[in-house]
Amino acid sequence: MYDVLLIVPGDGEGIGEAAGEIISIFRGNSLNAGIFLVSEKNREECGNPRDEHVGDRAGTGTFADLYTAVVSGKIGTRSLWWVNDPGSIPQTPSRIEEMWSGLEKGNDLVIMVHSSIPLIRKFVGMLLFPEWKDPFSGIFVVKGDAFREYATPDLQGPLLPHLLSRIPWNGVIEVPGPGHEPQGVRMHYGWGSRVRGLGQIISYAVSEEKSPLRTELGKIVRFALVGLSGILVNTGFLYLFTEIGGIFYLASSALAIEISILTNFIFNDFWTFKSRTGLIRQRWKRLASYNFLALGGMAVNMGVLYGLTAFFDVYYLYANIIGILFAFLWNYLTNRNITWR
């Protein structure tokens, strides 16, 4: 039985010395550790690792091979550590101790967070996993029992987002890591694998009530419905003020926009994000934030509309629809991560 099963991508070439240093650090903390070399190739193609320094090898193969070995008990382990670049860990052994401490405190998943995160990863993270700073980190540890309960052998693409869509978030913590995530010998997933993996994540979230991601997807849907209701409110009051009240249409439009912003905020505060426990002062702060960010959404919509029509000769109605989509992303991401953080 291992205390630690170190999961390293590749066939072992060039990583043995660094992996050996990590094993020594674990042993220095009285933890029994082994290494599993995981690859997109099957076990027969992987063969034996070519690096003579890779000792304490528990196995070699695909993720499905790893899953089968752990779940069947062929490889017994208390925890599984995903490390894309073993060479970056021995330089900061205190981080290993901090991550192990996170497991000892009862957490199922501990993630090392890098302060500098690629923009596309940050965008997807803010949309699907807004509670976490780096949901695509290449260094994390999952408790063995949690892996056996929440993983399946057919998972595609990076594992961490799958785990975050399945493991309750009150059992997940993050610890600080280095500024930039080293590339090292990390697994490189093809776009096909990534797309299938995203499909698996969303399918699980939709079908499983216990998925924490299900709650986030529900917020996105409710936010969109509230936005649609805001369009009706805006249009209705614009007509009311202009045709019945006799107010100049631009002034009517400004009033109608503000009323729709207020009604959208009320629906989002009480329904989308269910912030019923907030104090009155906190609600006013959220209203001010929502109002300010809504103006930013308007600017995004108008900017996309102008840019597409003026520089790409896109028909203005089509350009406006695209602008609305970008404005929706702006409004949801900023409000979810600022107003209702």
Image (cartoon, helix red, strand yellow):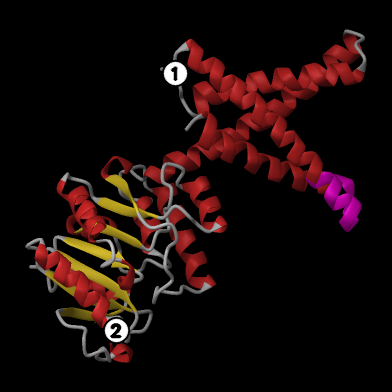
Nearer to me, 173 or 151:
173
Nearer to me, 216 or 205:
216
Q: Which residue is mark 1?
A: 276
- Give the crowd class for mark 2: few <14, some 14-19, many >=20 residues within 10 Å: many
- Give the crowd class for mark 1: few <14, some 14-19, many >=20 residues within 10 Å: few
- Percent x, y of residue 145: 18, 56
Circle 2: element type: loop
Three-letter amino acid code of the residue under disc 2 = Gly
Q: Which residue is mark 2?
A: 12
Give left or right: position of 173 versus 235. Answer: left
Circle 1: element type: loop
Residue 71 visible in the picture: no
The residue lying at 30 percent from left, 63 percent from top is 152
The residue lying at 65 percent from left, 31 percent from top is 293
- Percent x, y of residue 62: 31, 78
Give left or right: position of 273 versus 305. Answer: left
Question: Does the magenta-highlighted stretch encompass residue 258?
Answer: no
Three-letter amino acid code of the residue under disc 1 = Arg
The residue segment tinted magenta is: 304-318
Residue 150 visible in the picture: yes
- Percent x, y of residue 158: 41, 65
338 w.r.t. 74: above or below? above
Q: Quadrant of the N terminus?
A: bottom left
Q: Main secondary structure of the magenta part?
A: helix
